[in-house]
Image (cartoon, helix red, strand yellow):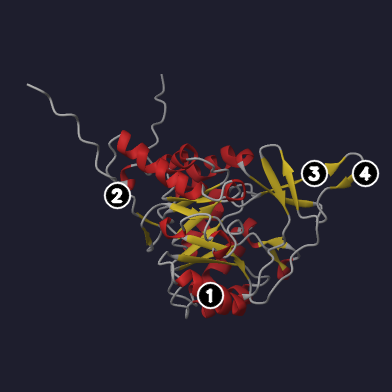
Amino acid sequence: MVEKANAPYPKPDLHTDIGGLVLDNPVMTASGTFGYGAEFDGLVDLKRLGAIVVKGVSLQASAGNPPPRIVETACGMLNAIGLENVGLDAFAREKLPFLARLGVPVIVNIYGKTIAEYARLGSLIDTMDAVAALEINISCPNVSAGGIAFGVDPSAAAHVVQAVRAQTGKPLIVKLSPNVTDVVEIAKSCRSAGAQSLSLINTITGMAIDSESRRPRLANITGGLSGPAIKPVALRMVWQVACAVDIPVIGIGGIFTAADALEFIIAGAAAIQVGTANFINPATTTDILDGLTDYMQRHEIERMQDLIGSLVLNSSK
């Protein structure tokens, strides 16, 4: 009698919930690394993405910082783009129509210099049917507080979230800064203020110097470090926050492969965002998606929900 070959394990269910917004899969783009989506059209199948997070949008257009504003580093890069963007009106008129045709959830990353600006952005975007959710970037200078970033103070972070929450019914994701003493304290404050999901981490502040000229390599002097160099820090913070709050966490930081993404998901992330890797291989997101599917089939994991937070801690001896 000839035995039948084992049938391949069924394709897993990759759906995930990031705070009221259900995605077909957990692979998203990271704000500031994927433009407004159209820049990658033809380089990657955009319709396969779980969601597209556009670069940060402010009320008014911004030219950003002067060059040089990007420097390559060991295992990463420093950027001091300065949140250059076209402004909300131009985004809605020129960028959003293309995104709306994709059938993929569009998440708009917003930033402001004051709480009133954040609130105004929330109010205006609330009327845009093509926008599925907002991601609040609280790693911005707080002009009213002497240049302190909203994201490093629990009270200031909460006030921003409350202000936006009052203006929109769309799901709210808050992007956390790693440049803090206790990221869990900030996370809890945002959760209490109305955040439905938390994404972390943003870039880590760093700098580079040209030893020949003895001058900073960035015109802004300091910039945000991203790429594989920050992955261990990001992974640790995602695990800490996922253990501390009862809302979904989105992992960001040095994710280049499916194995990287899996580390974040196993640590507790309900979804991940791909950033710096997009500059090296535009198809990184879909490569990761294929890798996640292959991993779950090989390990006979039926649902993404069964993988999230499945970290096995070493038992004490």
Give 40 or 54, whichever is nearer the viewer. Answer: 40
Decide: is 135 above or below 262. Answer: below
Q: Is residue 281 placed above or below 91 in the rendered structure?
A: above
Measured Cα–Cα span from mark 2 to mark 3: 44 Å
Please name the residue that numbered disc 4 is placed on.
213
Residue reaching furthest top? 317
Q: Which callout, 2 or 1, points to the residue nearer the camera? A: 2
Q: Earlier in the sequence, mark 1 or mark 4?
A: 1
Residue 58 in the image: state x and y as whole percent: 63, 72
Q: Give x and y (percent) for residue 4.
A: 14, 29
Task: State which mark lies toward you, 1 or 3.
Answer: 3
| Residue type at the position of mark 3 | Ala
Image disc number at residue 43: none
* Amino acid under disc 1: Gly
* Quarter of the N terminus within the rendering: top left
Q: Earlier in the sequence, mark 3 or mark 4?
A: 3
Q: Residues within 10 Å of mark 3 (few under 14, many from 20)?
A: some
Question: How far is mark 3 from mark 4, CA to CA?
Answer: 12 Å
* Position of residue 203 in the picture relative to residue 239 (left or right): right
For label 3, the residue is 208
Which residue is drawn at the image coordinates 42% and 47% (left, top)?
A: 289
Callout 4 environment at 10 Å: few (<14), some (14 to 19), or many (20+)? few
Q: Earlier in the sequence, mark 2 or mark 4?
A: 2
Label 1 Cα neighbours within 10 Å, binned few <14 / some 14-19 / many ≥20: many
State yes or no: discs 2 and 1 in contact (Cβ < 8 Å). no
User: Which type of secondary structure does the marked residue at label 2 adopt?
Assistant: loop
Q: Residue 13: which numbered mark, if any?
A: 2
